[in-house]
Amino acid sequence: MLLAQACGDALGVQYEFATPPEGEAEMIGGGLGPYAPGQWSDDTQMALCIARVAATGADLRSADALDEIADAFEGWLREGATDVGTQTRAVLGAAARLKGRASERLTRGARELHERTGRTAGNGALMRTAVVGLMMTLR
C-alpha cells in the first residue's frame, strides 16, 4: 500500500496544481517542491511518519502513539521538509508555540485554524492516512 502510494505520488507530484499532461505522464521532477524525478511529496513523507509508528504495533488511537506521530510531523518540518501545504504549516507552526503533549498541541492548532478561517477541508490529511485504515483492518 505504501509503495503504491509513493509511486503514484512521485508520478503526480510535478503536475500538482498544473495543467494535466498531454499523452502519458512522465516522472520529470519539479512541481511545488524541489523534487527530483521519482521523488514523492510531503503527503507520502508524512504517511511514512505514521507508518513508522504503526510498524511498532502501537494502537494508533492511543495518546502515546498520537504523540509519536505528532513529534514525527514536527521533526519532519524542522528537518527540512521538501514542501509543506499551507494548512499543515499553519497547524504545525501554531502547535510549536503551544505547551503540552504533542498530539494535543497539534489538535489545538488545527482547531484554532478552523475557528479562525473555517477553511480547513484540505485533502492532505486524507492523502496520508491510508496506513491508518490498513492498521485498523489488521486489529
Image: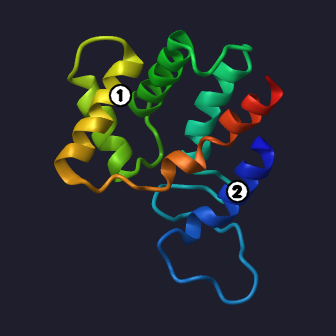
Residue at horizontal 66%, vertical 56%? 9
Q: Amino acid at mark 2?
A: Gly
Image location of residue 59, percent across then percent down? 66, 16
The foreground one among 70 and 21 is 70
Mark 1 or 2, closer to the camera: 1
Give 25 or 139, whichever is nearer the viewer.
Answer: 139
Residue 17 against residue 106 in the figure, above or below: below
Q: Is residue 75 above or below residue 18?
A: above
- Disc 2 marks which residue? 38
- C-alpha separation, residue under disc 1 versus residue under disc 2: 30 Å
Name the disc covering residue 106, or none.
1
Q: Amino acid at mark 1?
A: Leu
Mark 1 Cα-neighbour bin, 10 Å: few <14, some 14–19, many ≥20: many
Residue 131 placement, left or right of 95: right
Total labels: the figure holds 2
Point out residue 130 in the picture as x, y percentages from the top left corner.
Answer: 68, 43
Element under label 2? Answer: loop
Query: What is the quadrant of residue 128 in the picture?
Result: top right
Counting from the top left corner in percent of width and height, residue 3 is at 79, 45
The residue that appears at 61% across and 41% down in the rendered structure is 129
Image quarter in which the C terminus is found:
top right
**Farthest-out residue, bottom:** 22
